[in-house]
Every structure is written in structure tokens, then in C-alpha cells.
């Protein structure tokens, strides 16, 4: 039997499955393996889907399941498609009326299928969307857009909005995701736009892929210049290489070029970027001011009434602009739940020293809303994180290994503490991506820098965001740090960082001394490898007291907890400014080609 839901058009034999492993054939009928079943159901703000030109600041009920029709290197939702059978234990069957009732109870104006591909649960999604529309809710999804024409025809009547995640425009880019062609996706964008569905497109931007993105923009402009284009700066989750990650500066330059083709272009995964704002295409006035709000997410800070510029131009925005936005608690909202699952997996992998699949009860416990919601607070302190290691150890039946990891980390922390305890504390500023994006004072990274003997100036900032806030030039100058650390996640090369400081006229002792350091991914958040980051920061802050051999420590950590050597491939970017040998991190230092969540 042929499945006609997506353009793979899999042949599914009796009892077998297709590429996505989410449909099977019973007695000549193809049906979903897990109908009306969801991994997460939670309220989110619309800008985390992300959608920027549809009902700004709206609160939607986001549903997700597991599985995908694609397999893209570096996928932000990779944890949802790697071990489908294991993850399926965590699915909960919730009939459409119950999902709609939850949306109403939560005060949501719509329902959105997001985080994984809705094509893997199309009959369920259509049943849910029909129920939701009957109850007066808006409906939509985030999708790779690889539907067949006949499947899309069934879905269109139930869609108000859609975000199509483009891989590029060449068949090669689609082949990398194990799909054959780009053409069906652009065909479907046209179908959706002509049917009156609100369409936004996001495109993955990999280093060196500027022409691909420019060509995508030309094709979208030919369909409708009103389609907002979201440039997703590639961040290598999973197994993808660091060398494919463009810098924020490169991405901003690309966005500038894209504005010659499309009026509404936005840059994601780039904390502090100026390219999340909507500016009037005629006079350049800011109509919507936005801030980075986690991976693939944004938050609206200010909006001009009616999305109308003082020069008279109206930005094509559908629906009402809510006066206030919805702030998701903890790790809930947007793509944060997938990060939460990855963090649990990053610990589990250390405890099983390799690839051993999770026991059946593991994911159902981890994927619970209470666990994901509560995780945020637990991972903001070192003691909380050590407690989480023990918890994960119990959940995967590896308490002894968890105790060994706990003891190893505790021992290194004690060594760092005793080395720096009576030394003067330098003023440290911890930022993410660009100079004007400051991490929240309550973040784990801040705790790490304090443990390493720094006085972290982020504590002077009272505003909070996720994971931080934009600063003004004056606020930055007032902090006047003597050392700046750029986080390992959504990072930036120090030379780009200093270049931005110079462009913005930012003044601080750290800037004039060039004392700007970036940590490798996973060394300051979300992985037990934070212990390596702690030692690296101690080297940077107290070169007179600390000279940890980070190469040797990395090799030891990998052999002991991943049962292998660190990768030998070097990351194609520098991790600190030249001339700071005491940090132990040099511009092409062999820190091991580490990825954001490698190897978990
Ligand atoms: S939805 Fe799944 S089974 Fe159906 S054609 Fe696509 S990949 Fe194959």
C-alpha cells in the first residue's frame, strides 16, 4: 500500500512502516500508529512558533508528538525523532475535545502543531483542527511543507496560519535531509498563499549558503512579497559540525542583502541582533521591537498601534495585536521542551558511557510537563544540577554511575573554589551572542563564573528575559566589566564581538583590553561538561592561581564518561582572544570539535 501523505509516497507492507515510522498497514489500510497521541500539550506565545505577522503576542496551545518525515543534520528537535519507539512510551492519548477544552481553560486563542512534523500525525491533526475551528479557535502548524497535493487539499480548510521550514532551494539541501526535492515545498507554499492561509517561511542558513538563501527569497517574492522570511542561523544541535554555523555578524549582513528582495526579513538564533525588529520598508521606522527568546523564538517588546507606521505604511499583520504577551514558565514554550529533553539525555549518555537506548520508563517520566517545567529552576545552580544527575541516575537505573559523575564534578569544584577563594574578584560580564544581550543574573553561567572567582556584573540588571535581556549602550557602559565571557551556546567569535563593540561605540575596560573570551558549546550550560567550563573560566579570571590543563582534563572526561576520545576535528572558530595563554584556550585550541549537545 502507498502512503500519500507526504512526497516520499512510501510503500508500506502489511505490519510495516514507512520512512517516518509513524504509519502502518493493517489489512490493506494505512493508519496512524499513535492516533490522537501527544508528547507535549502546553500554552506558548505565538512568537516562539515562530510567527511574527499573525496575532502578535497571542497565546496558543502547542501540541507535539514524535517523529518526522525528514532527517536533518543538526535538527533542534532531533531528540524527538532519534528513538521513536522509546519516545512513543511517553505519548499520551488525548481526544480532540479534551485538547480544545484545555485550550479554552488556558485562555488560548488557537491551537498549533509544532516541535515535530504534523504530517506524521495528519489524521489526528485534522480531527483536532476541525474540533478547534468549531470552537472558534484559530489553527495552524509549523511544518517542512513536504505534503502531497492531495494531503494538503484535505488540510487547507482547517488552517489559518502556517510556518514552512525551508531547508534551502536546491535538491541537494533536501537530499541532506533525506528528501528528494525542494519543488513540492514551493508548490505547497503557493497553494497555501493562494488559499488565503497566512504563510511565514523560515529558511536554514548554513555557513557559505548565502546564495541558497537569496534564491529562496527570490522564489518567495515571486509568490508574495508579503511573506515574512525568517532566517534560522544554523546552530549545530546533534551531530552537525560547528564549521557549518555562520556567525551572527555574517547572518546580519545576509539579512541586509535579503531586504533588497523581501521587505520583511528576520534573524533567529542570534541573541541581541537588531534583525528581529520589523522596520517600515518605506522610512525605516521601527514598527515592532523584538528580543531573542530562546532557540527559534522571539518576544515582542513594543508594537506600533495597528502595525501602522507614522509615514502611513501598514505592515501586513493578520489579527489583533495583544497588549500583553504570555510568558511561559521554566522550560515550557517554543522549542525549550526539546532542549529540556536533550539536557536529560546529555546526563544519561554520561551514565551509560555510549549509545545504550533509554529504558522504557525513562522518557515517559522525563517528558511530563511537571518535569520539564521544574527543570529550569533545578539547572540554574551547581547543587541543583548535581541533584539532577542523581535523579537521572535513578530514572535510568544507573545510580552508581551517577554517584561517580557527581563525585568527579564535586571534586573539581572544590579544587577551583579553594584555588580562588581569597583572590580579588574581577568584574565579569556574561553575555550571549552579541555584546548587548546580557544573560539573566539567575542563570547557571553566572553561578559558574562566581564559583570561578568572579564578581558578575549581570547581577546589577533587574530586568529578566529568556535567557536574558537586551541592554542599551549606556547600560553596557555603566557595567564596565574588566572581563567578558561569551556563552558557549549561541556563541560568537570574540573578534566579531569586538567588531560589534566598535561599531556600536561600546566602552568598557574589557573591550579596550580585548579581554573577551568565548567558551566551547556545552561547557557552561546543559551538559555535565560544565565542569570543564568552570576550570576554563577559573584560568581566565585567576591566571596567577589557576592553570588547569584543559586538554588533559577534556581527554580524561571523555574517556571516563563517554568511553571515547574527544573528536580530533577542530572547530572552525576561535574561543578566546589571542594573547591570553593562561586561559588554556587559544584561537585554534584543540578543544575537540565539540557540538552544542554532543554527544547526548
Ligand atoms: S507520511 Fe510517513 S509513511 Fe507516509 S509517505 Fe511520508 S514518510 Fe512515508
Image (cartoon, helix red, strand yellow):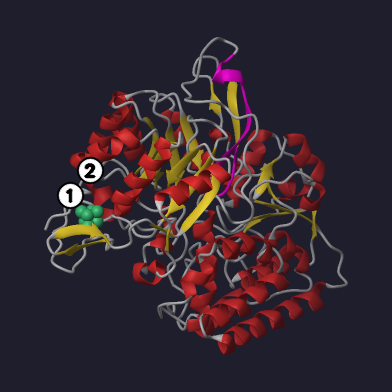
Q: Residue at the spot x=43%, y=54% of the render? A: 64
Q: 240 or 593, which lies in front? A: 240
Q: Residue at the spot x=75%, y=41% of the render? A: 476
Q: Which mark is residue 277?
A: none
For label 1, the residue is: 4
- Tell me if the residue at label 1 has its CB under 8 Å from ligand 1: yes
In the rendering, at what x and y percent does residue 193 appear? 31, 28
Task: Give the side of residue 460 with respect to residue 79, left or right.
Answer: right
Q: Residue at the spot x=44%, y=23% of the render? A: 263
Q: Quadrant of the N terminus?
A: bottom left
In the rendering, at what x and y percent does residue 75 appear? 40, 56
Q: Is residue 177 depicted above or below 388 in this figure?
A: above
In the rendering, at what x and y percent does residue 517 appear? 65, 57
Magenta stretch bounds: 291-309
Task: Give the side of residue 241 with respect to residue 41, left or right.
Answer: left
Do the residues bearing badges 2 and 1 touch, measured as CB atoms within 8 Å?
A: yes
Task: Give the side of residue 502 with respect to residue 522, left or right.
Answer: right
Q: Is residue 139 depicted above or below 564 in this figure?
A: above
For label 2, the residue is: 151
Amino acid at each position: 500500500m502507498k502512503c500519500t501523505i507526504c512526497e516520499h509516497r512510501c510503500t508500506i507492507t502489511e505490519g510495516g512502516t514507512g520512512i517516518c515510522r509513524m504509519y502502518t498497514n493493517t489489512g490493506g489500510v494505512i493508519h496512524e500508529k499513535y492516533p490522537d497521541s501527544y508528547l507535549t500539550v502546553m500554552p506558548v506565545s505565538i512568537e516562539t512558533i515562530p510567527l511574527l505577522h499573525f496575532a502578535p503576542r497571542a497565546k496558543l496551545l502547542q501540541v507535539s508528538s514524535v517523529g518526522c518525515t525528514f532527517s536533518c543534520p543538526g535538527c533542534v528537535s532531533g531528540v524527538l525523532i532519534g528513538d521513536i519507539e522509546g519516545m512513543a512510551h511517553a505519548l499520551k492519548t488525548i481526544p480532540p475535545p479534551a485538547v480544545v477544552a484545555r485550550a479554552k481553560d488556558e485562555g488560548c486563542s488557537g491551537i498549533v502543531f509544532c516541535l515535530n512534523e504534523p504530517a506524521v500525525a495528519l489524521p489526528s491533526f485534522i480531527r483536532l483542527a476541525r474540533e478547534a475551528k468549531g470552537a472558534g479557535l484559530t489553527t495552524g502548524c509549523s511544518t517542512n511543507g513536504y505534503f502531497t497535493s492531495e494531503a494538503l487539499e484535505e488540510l487547507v480548510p482547517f488552517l489559518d496560519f502556517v510556518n514552512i521550514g525551508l531547508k534551502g532551494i536546491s535538491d541537494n539541501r533536501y537530499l541532506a535531509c533525506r528528501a528528494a526535492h525542494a519543488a513540492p515545498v514551493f508548490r505547497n507554499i503557493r497553494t497555501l498563499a493562494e488559499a488565503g492561509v497566512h504563510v511565514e517561511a523560515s529558511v536554514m542558513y548554513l555557513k557559505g549558503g548565502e546564495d541558497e538563501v537569496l534564491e529562496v527569497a527570490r522564489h518567495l517574492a515571486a509568490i508574495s512579497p508579503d511573506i515574512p522570511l525568517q532566517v534560522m542561523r544554523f546552530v549545530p544541535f546533534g551531530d552537525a559540525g560547528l564549521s557549518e554555523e555562520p556567525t551572527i555578524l555574517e547572518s546580519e549582513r545576509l539579512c541586509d542583502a535579503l531586504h533588497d528582495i523581501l521587505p520583511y526579513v528576520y534573524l533567529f538564533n542570534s541573541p541581541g541582533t537588531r534583525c528581529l525588529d520589523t522596520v517600515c520598508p518605506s522610512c525605516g521606522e521601527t514598527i515592532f521591537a523584538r528580543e531573542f527568546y530562546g532557540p527559534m523564538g522571539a518576544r515582542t517588546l513594543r508594537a506600533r498601534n495597528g502595525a501602522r507606521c507614522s509615514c502611513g505604511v501598514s505592515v501586513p499583520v493578520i489579527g489583533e495585536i495583544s497588549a500583553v504577551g504570555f510568558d511561559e514558565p521554566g522550560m515550557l514554550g517554543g522549542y525549550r521542551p526539546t532542549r529540556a529533553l536533550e539536557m536529560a539525555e546529555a546526563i544519561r549518555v554520561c551514565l551509560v558511557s555510549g549509545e545504550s537506548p533509554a529504558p522504557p520508563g525513562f522518557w515517559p517520566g522525563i517528558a511530563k510537563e511537571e518535569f520539564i517545567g521544574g527543570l529550569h529552576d533545578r539547572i540554574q545552580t551547581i547543587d541543583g544540577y548535581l541533584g539532577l544527575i542523581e535523579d537521572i541516575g535513578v530514572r535510568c537505573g544507573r545510580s552508581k554511575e551517577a554517584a561517580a559523575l557527581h563525585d568527579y564534578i564535586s571534586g573539581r569544584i572544590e579544587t577551583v573554589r579553594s584555588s580562588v577563594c581569597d583572590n580579588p574578584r574581577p568584574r565579569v560580564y556574561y553575555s550571549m551572542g552579541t555584546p548587548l544581550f546580557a544573560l539573566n543574573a539567575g542563570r547557571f553561567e553566572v553561578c559558574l563564573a562566581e564559583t570561578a572567582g568572579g564578581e558578575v556584573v549581570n547581577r546589577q540588571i533587574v530586568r529578566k528575559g529568556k535567557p536574558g535581556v537586551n541592554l542599551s549602550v549606556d547600560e553596557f557602559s555603566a557595567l564596565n566589566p574588566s572581563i567578558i565571557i561569551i556563552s558557549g551556546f549561541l556563541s560568537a567569535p570574540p573578534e566579531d564581538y569586538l567588531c560589534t563593540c566598535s561599531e556600536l561605540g561600546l566602552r568598557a575596560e574589557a573591550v579596550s583590553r580585548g579581554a573577551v573570551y568565548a567558551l566551547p558549546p556545552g561547557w557552561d550550560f546543559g551538559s555535565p561538561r560544565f565542569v570543564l567550563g568552570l576550570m576554563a573560566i577559573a584560568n581566565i579570571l585567576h591566571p596567577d592561581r589557576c592553570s588547569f590543563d584543559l586538554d588533559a582534563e577534556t581527554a580524561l572526561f571523555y574517556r571516563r564518561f563517554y568511553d571515547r576520545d574527544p573528536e580530533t576535528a577542530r572547530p572552525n572558530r576561535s574561543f578566546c582572544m589571542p594573547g591570553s595563554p593562561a586561559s588554556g584556550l587559544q584561537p585554534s585550541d584543540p578543544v575537540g570539535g565539540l557540538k552544542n549537545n554532543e554527544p547526548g
